[in-house]
Structures are given as C-alpha cells and as structure tokens.
Image (cartoon, grey):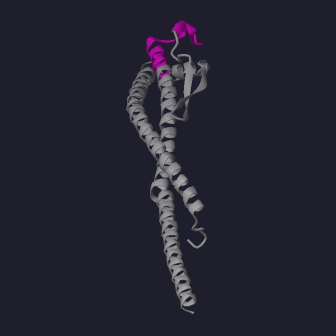
C-alpha cells in the first residue's frame, strides 16, 4: 500500500467509495435475486413449451408415417413441394429487469385446408392431417425459439450480475476496507508521534524556562 496517501482527506474519500460500493452491492444482489426468480418461473414455462413441442413432433411423425404408408411417398412429396408458404412473424422486444428479450409476434402457421397451396380433392384425409400436424409443429418451434432465447439471456445476465456481486463482496470492498484500516492506523500512529513530539517540546520549553529562572 505504498502508493496510498495516508491522509484524512484520502480516508474520507475512501469511506465514501466504500459506502457507494456497499450500496451498489446491495442493489446488485437484489437484481440477481430478482433475475433468479424470473428465471425459475420462465424455466417452468419453458419445460411445458418444450414438452408440448416434443409431443407435436411425435404426432407429426406418426401422421407422416401413416400417410406415406397408405398414400405413398410420392403423393406426400408432391404435397410438400406445393406447400411453399413461410411462417409470417415479426420480432419485438421486451424488458425483464434490464434484460432485453425477444417477443415473436406471429400469425398461426396452422391453416384451413382450403387456404393451403395444394388442391383439396387431390389429397387424402391422412395427408391433410400430416400437413396440419407439421403446421402445429412449426408454431411450437417458434414458441420454443422465443422462450429458449429468453432463458439463455437471463442465464447470461444472472451470471454477469453474480460475478459483479462476488467481485464487490470478496475483492473490491474488502480491499478498500483494508486500505481504510491502513490509513486509520497510519493516522493514529502519526497522532501518537505528534503527541510525543509535543510533549518533548513542552518538556524542553519547561526545562529552558527553569534554567532561565535559576540564572
């Protein structure tokens, strides 16, 4: 700590910094705890959404397998080539405790049979059901994409906030407090030396006065 100036002004400045760091530490802990609560809630929602997507995927696979087995791979492939529509969506943003996360605004991918690109009379109910199942799957995938991104960004922010909390708690604040103790010790040492010097000076002056009085 040779670079530290052990002065009262430096001690006052340091104590102010400690106070600000302590307040910042408390606020960051509150933010971290709040983010963790939000994360746990969204994680439960994510589990349900992902579970729903898996179910829709399994259903779509079953419908597709049945359609291929009964109506033939060529018939299914012809319909898949005809279905050229892409999901229509826009990505907005929302704020969760300072964390920007995406919100996907979308039109349902699932459509009525008459709104699809292939002719209704040229397919079977099995193919229609397979198409519908995959449309529902795409809707579910978009929902999962939104919530997975939210979870990822919350995890990143929690980790970043936790590192800042730990840095303040275990390095920054203890280091400043140690420096404050060092300055306090040096000032007290200086005060003691000053008092001793004053006592010696007073004793010398008293001795001189006595000598002058005796002369």
**Number of residue marks:** 0
Residue 127 included in the magenta stretch of the image: yes
Q: Position of residue 97 (x, y in %)?
A: 50, 34
Residue 176 included in the magenta stretch of the image: no
Q: Is residue 200 above or below residue 123?
A: below
Asked whether 127 or 171 is in front, the reply is 171
Kindly identify the residue that appears in the image at 49 percent across and 18 percent down: 131
Q: Does residue 37 appear to the left or right of 139 in the view shown?
A: left
- Magenta extent: 113-134
Residue 103, picture quadrant: top right
Q: Position of residue 83 (x, y in %)?
A: 59, 19
Q: Position of residue 81 (x, y in %)?
A: 60, 22
Q: Is residue 89 above or below residue 212?
A: above
Q: Quadrant where the N terminus lies?
A: bottom right
Q: Is residue 24 above or below residue 62?
A: below
Prevailing SS of the magenta stretch: helix
Asked whether 182 or 78 is in front, the reply is 182
Asked whether 16 or 175 is in front, the reply is 16
Kindly identify the residue that appears in the image at 56 percent across and 82 percent down: 205
Q: Quadrant where the C terminus lies?
A: bottom right
Q: Is residue 19 above or below residue 60?
A: below
Asked whether 121 or 57 is in front, the reply is 57
Kindly identify the residue that appears in the image at 48 percent across and 61 percent down: 177
Q: Position of residue 52 (x, y in %)?
A: 39, 26
């Amino acid at each position: 700590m040779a670079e530290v100036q052990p002065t009262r002004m430096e001690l006052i400045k340091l104590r102010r910094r400690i106070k600000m760091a302590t307040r910042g530490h408390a606020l960051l802990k509150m933010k971290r705890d709040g983010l963790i609560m939000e994360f746990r809630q969204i994680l439960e929602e994510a589990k349900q959404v992902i579970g729903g997507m898996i179910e829709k995927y399994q259903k779509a696979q079953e419908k597709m397998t049945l359609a291929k087995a009964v109506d033939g791979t060529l018939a299914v492939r012809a319909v898949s080539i005809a279905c050229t529509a892409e999901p229509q969506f826009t990505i907005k943003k929302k704020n969760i405790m300072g964390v920007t996360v995406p919100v996907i605004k979308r039109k349902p991918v699932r459509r009525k049979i008459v709104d699809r690109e292939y002719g209704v009379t040229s397919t079977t109910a099995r193919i229609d059901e397979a198409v519908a199942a995959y449309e529902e799957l795409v809707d579910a995938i978009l929902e999962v994409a939104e919530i997975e991104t939210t979870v990822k960004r919350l995890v990143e922010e929690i980790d970043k906030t936790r590192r800042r909390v730990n840095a303040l708690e275990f390095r920054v604040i203890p280091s400043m407090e140690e420096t404050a103790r060092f300055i306090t010790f040096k000032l007290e040492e200086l005060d003691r030396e000053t008092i001793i010097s004053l006592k010696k000076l007073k004793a010398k002056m008293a001795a001189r006065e006595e000598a002058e009085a005796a002369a």
